Amino acid sequence: MKFSEMPYERIDFEALKGAFKELEEALDRAESGEEQFAVHEKFYKICNHVMTESQIAMIRSDIDMSDEHYLEEQRYFDEQMPVFQNLVVSYQKKLYHSKFRPYLEEKIGKVAFKNMELAMKAVDEKLIPLMQEENRLQTEYNKLLASAKIDWHGETLNLSLMNPYLNHKDRAVRKEAWEKYTAFFVEHEEEFDEYYDRLVKNRTEQGRMMGYDNYLPLGYARMNRNSYGRNEVAEFRKQVKRDLVPFAEKLHEIRRQRLGLSALSYIDEGAYFPEGNPAPVGTPQQILEAGQRMYNELSPETAEFMNFMCENELFDVLGRKNKKTGGYMTMIPDYNSPFIFANFNGTSGDADVITHECGHAFQGYITASDPIREHNDITMETAETHSMSMEFFTEPWMPLLFGAGADQYRKMHFEDAVTFIPYGTMVDEFQDIVYANPDLSPAERKAVWRDLERQYKPHLDYSGNDYFERGGFWQKQHHIYDSPLYYIDYCIAGTNALQYKVKMDQDYKAAWQSYLELCRLSASDFFDALVKKAGLANPFEDGCLKYVVAQLEKKM
């Protein structure tokens, strides 16, 4: 069904409570594992419908954050989704403790039961008021970001539409753009501080109500980290600092020389070539058409997927006023449909949407018909492996998107893929410190951020920008506000994507078959087993990044 034709109806959560009561009673009455699984299939249908309606409401609200109807629907789900999460956990508790569990484990897998265990540690009815407040604060923060109206030479632009000027080939333009961009955050600095302070205190209280010292154990459970914990992540961060940061700094030095600059400033972070960064050729519609051709040529599976997306209006990618910033892929379960949301702005980021978000959507599409719903409950580092690896697999088709600038794009993408990992890892360490020390003041948090920048991005120079020099850069990173602890996943996945880069340079066809197998495995196994089956090294194992860097340096 076309997205524009998908009907929307608000979920009646009182009726939903009755439906879940009936499910639990049916589980109790069941006299065999087969009977309980039949009940579980009804659970799938109910959950799919709730998620469908909530995602339609979210997408339509994000498309136009001035649309009061869907904004109100989003507020409604902000209030009610914690109720739904508790209903799900209450039902899952019965399933988890079922006397027919051996049959059910055989049917839906051990991973599903580990995830249920984490869900029971992550959600409790007593947390509902705090979870509702958390949702409200996140929505208000995103509304503040979306409200930015920056006067740019007679045009009024939002934050996303400023990107072409932040990375402009003319350094004077970049400087002016960054000054105006930063001015919005300086103007609202106290609000950004207040939102985050309230979110940290809210989440800390939730953690303590669940019996933890702070939010971190609760946050790890909510991120569904079912095969690794805080210690493994800390070890990964050590690898990044020791093995990857020096390589990333070499790439920054190469970029400095290419730009002909005596020193790099923060205004140069997104600039790669003196003549300007490569940009897609053609209109947004032509970019989508080029993407359709690319996926039709890549493989039969990607062809079927992309044609389905285009035929059913499952892209909203044009940057507009009052549209939420950023981009994402989400699933609309009742229709087995992925949906891609983005803000095209005429930069290479538009191509990234056609590669990164389509990596997510492709994996979601090819496993959407799996009758075991739990197999689609992939953890985020696995999900981001699908998307970030697709960015490399589509590189042979970049002439369709960039014309003569394809080689420059590939070079820029490679450098960006490597240098992102230190930044993303820094975001994770910042959050780890903040939630371990929830009483830090806003100024102290900024000082923590600035100290981490000196460790992970030692070349960075904020001269002339007091706000960033004081450690304010992170306030533009919406994940820190509304997706706590979700960022190291990009770095673990980025390590896998670089492994695929090494593999495809050696044997593209074999690398693609490995990737396809990983997508099809979905969440049928734990992360460490998935990467092993795909023939990848586990990023948590010491030496993984050292090996990857050695291979990439050889290639250079």
Image: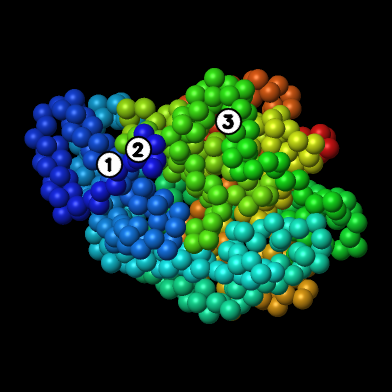
> Label 1 to label 2, Cα distance in Å?
7 Å
Please state which amino acid type lies under the numbered disc 2.
Pro
Earlier sequence position, callout 2 versus callout 3: 3
- Quarter occupied by residue 102: top left
Q: Which residue is mark 1?
A: 49
Q: Which residue is mark 3?
A: 292
Neighbor class of circle 2 (other Cα within 10 Å; few <14, some 14-19, many 20+) is: many
Q: Which residue is mark 2?
A: 333
Q: What residue appears at the point 50 percent right and 28 percent down from the top-left corner?
A: 307
Please state which amino acid type lies under the numbered disc 1.
His
What secondary structure is found at the residue carrying circle 1?
helix
Q: Does residue 382 appear in this view?
A: no
Q: Where residue 453 sits in the image (x, y, percent)?
A: 69, 64
Q: Where residue 399 sits in the image (x, y, percent)?
A: 73, 33
Q: Considering only vertical position in the picture, is 246 above or below 554?
A: below
- Quarter occupied by residue 280: top right
In this rendering, position of residue 238 left or right of residue 222: right
Please state which amino acid type lies under the numbered disc 3.
Gln
Cβ–Cβ under 8 Å for marks 1 and 2 = yes
Neighbor class of circle 3 (other Cα within 10 Å; few <14, some 14-19, many 20+) is: many
Q: Where residue 308 sits in the image (x, y, percent)?
A: 46, 29
Earlier sequence position, callout 1 versus callout 2: 1
Front one among 535 and 160: 160
> Label 3 to label 1, Cα distance in Å?
29 Å
Q: What residue appears at the point 74 percent right and 27 percent down from the top-left corner?
A: 505
Neighbor class of circle 1 (other Cα within 10 Å; few <14, some 14-19, many 20+) is: some
Give the residue furthest to the front.
Answer: 154
- The color scheme shown is rainbow
Quadrant including the N terminus: top left
Q: What residue appears at the point 73 percent right and 38 percent down from the top-left corner?
A: 402
What secondary structure is found at the residue carrying circle 3?
helix
Cβ–Cβ under 8 Å for marks 3 and 1 = no
